Amino acid sequence: MKKLLTFLFVTATALALQANPEGYVMVSMISPGQLPTQESNIYGGRLSVIYGDCQSLYGLDLGISGRIRERINGAQFGLLFSLDDAEMNGFGLGCVNYVAGEFAGCQVGLWNHAEGGAGVQLGIVNTSTTFSGVQLGLLNFAKTLNGVQIGLSNYAGAQGVCKWLPLVNVGW
């Protein structure tokens, strides 16, 4: 009887997730083997056992690795990497945190990247094209810096006051 009830519960949950492309929860072993599909917006949480992929996520993202195509508002915890193709507002923790678009919040990892960013990057290597805020790491790089870099090697390009400098670099 327990096996039958478990089977019915799992089947009903899978059908409900498949029927609703805008879900509250996404469970992914590896994309495209996930429910709901990668075209979905998730309003709640995502668990990516190996790799998950979705359009947008508003909430909590947990897993080994994952990709979000449009926007994340919330917190992302990826053991290996988190790839955000467009925009992130919130907190990212993982070995590699990569935001290909605008970022606002805090990134903590071995390598943090934001194409355009505002907030805090804490890591071994922090990179950004345009960054406003604090970069704290061994190597910090920003083509345009409006803020502070603290690390062994810092680079701020076009609008930054200094180029390669040890310890502290301030740009505005």
Image (tube, rainbow, N blue to C red):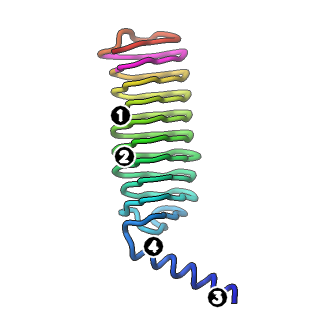
Q: State which region is magenta.
A: 145-158
Q: Earlier in the sequence, mark 4 or mark 1?
A: 4
Helix, strand or loop status at disc 2: loop
Q: Position of residue 158 (x, y in %)?
A: 30, 16
Question: Which amino acid does the dot numbered 3 rest on?
Answer: Leu
Q: Is residue 61 magenta?
A: no
Disc 2 designates what residue?
85
Disc 3 designates what residue?
4
Helix, strand or loop status at disc 1: strand
> Which is in the foreground here, disc 4 or disc 1?
4
The Cα atoms of the two marked residues, 2 and 1, are separated by: 10 Å
The Cα atoms of the two marked residues, 1 and 3, are separated by: 50 Å
> Which is in the foreground here, disc 2 or disc 3?
3
Question: Which amino acid does the dot numbered 1 rest on?
Answer: Glu
CB atoms of marks 4 and 2 within 8 Å: no
Helix, strand or loop status at disc 4: helix
Disc 1 designates what residue?
115
Local packing at callout 2 (Cα closer than 10 Å; few below 14, some 14-19, many 20+) is: some
Q: Position of residue 17 (x, y in %)?
A: 45, 73
Question: Which amino acid does the dot numbered 2 rest on?
Answer: Asp
- Which residue occupies 51% across, 10% down? 166
Disc 4 designates what residue?
17
CB atoms of marks 1 and 3 within 8 Å: no
Rendered position, 139 above or below 14: above
